[in-house]
């Protein structure tokens, strides 16, 4: 956690990871898990999306929500074994989970991130992400987030809170004012979430050329 600034606040950009900084293909994950359990891909998707009551948690949540808020991989593993009736090794489940997710770094992010850095814009990452993928992302891409230092990366699985409900906590943790912050995210509910909390949002939908144009329009870049 950093100390509160006393000088005039700088512009702040908060990056989403999936579908913005990183190109992600979740279909490959579903296919990988379906192959491991000998199940139909649509059945895996259905299990992934339907709400579950996990032991120790009174609320119903989707499997992704459970994981990206810090839930145990073992909990999810047991749900898969129970649903599909096939006992597989836990290590094989983790491997299928990790290796099945196709993730690539968007090179245009690196270029725009450098421009923001040169303009004196402070950058953060706020991602709803599972423990497995957070470790994978840091191992493979962490050093490439040159202008987003590790301490500025806010992962839901680590903090126990995510988007769209966690922006006030995010701001308090870093000692920033959301009125100076601009979230770049591909999900409308997260854009609405930061605006509701007093911040600003840019919906990422037409690529980085449009995003840079919008940042200049918002006077984040000159």
Image (cartoon, helix red, strand yellow):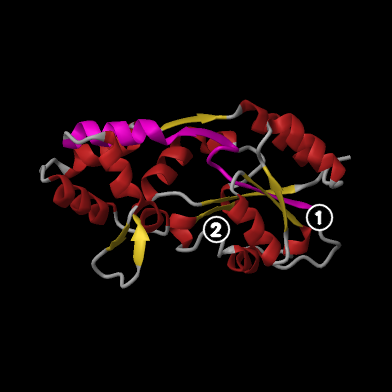
State which quadrant residue 119 falls in.
top right
Q: Is residue 171 above or below residue 219?
A: below
Residue span colored magenta? 11-37
- Give the x, y percent position of residue 115: 77, 35
Residue 175 seen by the camera: no
- Give the x, y percent position of residue 77: 22, 49
44, 144: nearer the viewer: 44
In the image, is 66 to the left or to the right of 175? left
Q: Residue furthest bottom?
A: 58
In the image, is 44 to the left or to the right of 148? left
Q: Secondary structure at mark 2?
A: loop
Mark 2 packing: few (<14 Cα in 10 Å), some, or many (20+)? some
Mark 1 packing: few (<14 Cα in 10 Å), some, or many (20+)? some
Asked whether 27 falls inside the magenta stretch, the response is yes
Q: Is residue 35 above or below residue 201?
A: above
- Give the x, y percent position of residue 50: 33, 54
- Give the x, y percent position of residue 19: 55, 37
Gap between marks 1 and 2, in whole Å?
23 Å
Among numbered discs 1 and 2, the one appearing first in the sequence: 1
Q: Residue at x 36, y 45 (%)?
A: 132
Residue identified by numbered label 2: 163
Asked whether 202 falls inside the magenta stretch, the response is no
Is the N terminus in the top left, top right, bottom left or bottom right quadrant?
A: bottom right
């Amino acid at each position: 956690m950093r100390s509160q600034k006393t000088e005039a606040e700088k512009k702040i950009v908060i990056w989403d990871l999936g579908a913005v900084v990183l190109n992600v293909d979740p279909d490959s994950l579903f296919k990988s898990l379906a192959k491991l359990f000998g199940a139909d891909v649509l059945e895996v998707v259905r299990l992934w999306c339907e709400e579950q009551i996990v032991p120790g948690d009174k609320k119903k949540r989707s499997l992704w929500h459970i994981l990206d808020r810090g839930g145990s991989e073992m909990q999810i593993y047991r749900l898969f074994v129970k649903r599909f009736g096939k006992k597989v090794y836990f290590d094989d489940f983790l491997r299928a989970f990790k290796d099945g997710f196709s993730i690539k770094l968007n090179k245009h992010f690196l270029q725009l991130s450098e421009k923001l850095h040169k303009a004196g814009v402070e950058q953060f990452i706020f991602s709803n992400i599972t423990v497995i993928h957070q470790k994978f992302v840091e191992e493979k891409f962490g050093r490439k987030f040159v202008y987003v230092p590790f301490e500025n990366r806010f992962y839901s699985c680590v903090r126990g809170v995510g988007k769209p409900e966690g922006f006030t906590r995010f701001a308090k943790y870093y000692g920033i004012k959301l009125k100076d912050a601009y979230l770049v995210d591909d999900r409308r509910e997260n854009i609405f979430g930061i605006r509701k909390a007093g911040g600003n949002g840019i919906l990422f939908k037409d690529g980085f050329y449009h995003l840079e144009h919008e940042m200049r329009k918002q006077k984040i870049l000159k």
